[in-house]
Every structure is written in C-alpha cells, then in structure tokens.
Amino acid sequence: AKARGRNTYHFFSQDLNDAAKEKLQIENHLREAIREHQFVLYYQPKIDIRTNVVIGYEALLRWVRPDGSMIPPLRFIPVAESTGLIVEIGEWIIWEACRFISRQQSRGHDVTISINLSARQFTDQNLAEVVERVLQRTGARADKLIFEITESMLMGDTDAAIAQLNELKGLGVTLSIDDFGTGYSSLSYLKRFPVDELKIDRSFVKDIPADTNDMDIVAAIIAMAQKMNLRVVAEGVETIEQIEFLKNNACYLVQGYYFSMPRAEQDLYNLSYQPLLI
Ligand code: C2E
Ligand code: CA
Ligand code: CA
Ligand code: CA
C-alpha cells in the first residue's frame, strides 16, 4: 500500500508539473497574444423566432495563433483569469464590442451585443468606469450593451455583487444570467439581483425533444422567468423540433447552430437583418 501510495504521489506530482508547465506556457503566449493583437471577436446572432430577425449578437472570444490555428476560449480563459490577464483582455473585448455596436448603428442596424464577463472582471472595482468611458468614446448606445454573468459570480459576496450590478445598471446597460440552471441559485434568490435576462443553458436544450425531463425544466424556467418579468433566451438551439418546442412555450429568443455558428464580423453581413428562412 505504501509503495502504491508513493507511486500515486509521483503520478500526481508529474501531472501537476505538466499542468503547471502548460499553464506557464499559455501565460507567456497570452502576453504575446495581447502584444501581437491575436485576439478576435466572433459574433453569434440572437434571433427572434417570431419574425426570424436578428435582434443582436453574442461576442465570443477567439485566439488566432500566427500559424492560423484557433484556440478555443475554454482552453485559455481559465489561465487568463488566474493570472489576472483577463482584465486587460476583457477591457479590449469591451472596446471591440462597443466599436462593433457603433459600426452597426451607422449601418442603421439596431442590434444588441452581449459580452461575457469573467469572475475577475466582475469583481473589478473599475469595471463600470471602464464601460462608461468606452461608451462615451465609441458612441455606442448603452441600451444596446448586455453583460452576461454566471450564477456563481453572484454567490460569493452578494452585497458586492449587487453593488456592482447596480453600478452597471446605472449606465443603462442590460444584465443577463448566463448558463442559467447549472448553478445553485433559485429564482427567488435571483430576485434580489437587478438582472433583466436569463439564458437557459444548452445542456437543458440539447436533448429536446428526446428528454421529457429537460422539456419540463425548460418550460418551468420560461414560465417562472415570465412571472418575474425577465427576458428569456435559449442557447445551443440546433434543431427545428427545439424551435417548435420553445415557440410553443413562449420563449422567442434563441441562439444556436440551427441559425448560425459564431462568425467573424465580415461574414455576418449576408445574415444580419435578412429574415432567415427556416
Ligand atoms: P458561453 O458563454 O455559454 O457561450 C456559448 C458557447 O456555446 C460558445 O462556445 C458557442 O460557440 C457555443 N454554441 C453556440 N451555439 C451552439 C450550438 O448550437 N451547439 C453547440 N454545441 N455549441 C454552441 P465558445 O465560443 O467556445 O465559448 C465557450 C465559453 O467560453 C463561453 O460559454 C464563455 O463561458 C467563454 N467565453 C467565450 N468568449 C468569452 C469572452 O469574451 N469573455 C469571457 N469571459 N468568456 C468567454
Ligand atoms: Ca455567454
Ligand atoms: Ca466602481
Ligand atoms: Ca451560456
């Protein structure tokens, strides 16, 4: 047992070492990525399925390496978060997203943009000041900007979270709870937070209509969100059956591969404001 324990120890220490090395490597590459402008925002349309019109976009971060390979956000955002680099990257995201809105405004496109906030960004005391400055400088309308936060970011220091949400709301932006249903908060708990929108997590949507439990959960989230006067968005919608189900349950805002994957801005223009055919 002792020998085995030692082996186990070596096994883990080797693993940790590799993980630490990989983290350090990503961290160095991230600094280079910031310097060399290797980040780009992709945009996924948010559709109103009553009219099939694009009402907004979610900005999703992409890291394009010099060799052209694209690194998915879940591989580097945790490192950016733990090293604090996310604050600098996140500020660039806010600028870029607001410049996007202002370009859309000048094309006469009245669309919203949703930005994902990381936990570190959300607890940053300067966040609202940064957002205010970017709105002023870019001329983007505050009511076109939506910040997505997760339930877990509201769980720790609730008073601080409420203060931050109020400060952001004071700028006129919209607040949204991302991945809703995967955290531990109840809707009554959520009532304490000044949020405007819930995004139903893809994990509840993906097995509709095969999984009747998921259908019940989604229907319940939609009904309760309506009672609380929250806008509700379904994410990860991939099939016509899912669209039918959502429509029948009065959830009209959706995102997902059924309509479009996230795309580079130049690849959006053949899409936006054209009613999409289903
Ligand atoms: P998320 O905010 O829940 O974003 C939705 C993810 O689901 C995106 O993955 C999107 O490409 C993907 N998706 C959208 N529709 C479908 C669908 O129909 N089917 C499937 N299978 N997937 C779909 P992505 O872009 O890889 O982002 C993953 C996560 O990384 C995001 O989850 C978010 O938590 C984080 N992230 C992405 N961009 C940013 C950012 O700018 N800042 C921060 N802090 N986090 C970001
Ligand atoms: Ca999101
Ligand atoms: Ca502040
Ligand atoms: Ca989500």
Image (spheres, rainbow, N blue to C red):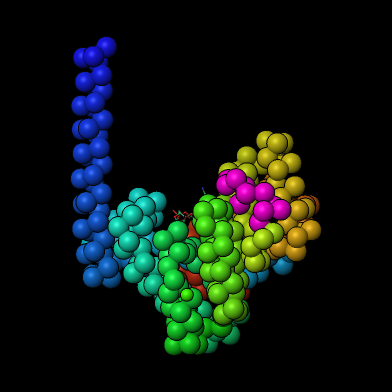
Of 110 and 96, nearer the camera is 96
Residue at the image position 79 percent from the left and 58 percent from the top = 227
Tell me the residue at 25%/19% (across/down). Answer: 5
Q: Quadrant of residue 85?
A: bottom left
The verdict on residue 186 being magenta is: yes
Depth check: give the residue in front, 103 or 74: 74
**Residue 129 painted magenta:** no
Q: Position of residue 199 (x, y in %)?
A: 62, 56
Measured along the vertical axis of the image, is residue 208 above or below residue 106? above
Q: Quadrant of the C terminus?
A: bottom right
The boundaries of the magenta stretch are 180-190
Q: What percent of the width, then of the height, locates residue 133?
A: 45, 84
Number of numbered tags placed on the structure image: 0
Q: Quadrant of residue 119?
A: bottom left
- Residue in front for this viewpoint, 107 or 192: 192
Residue 274, position as x, y percentages in the image: 61, 72
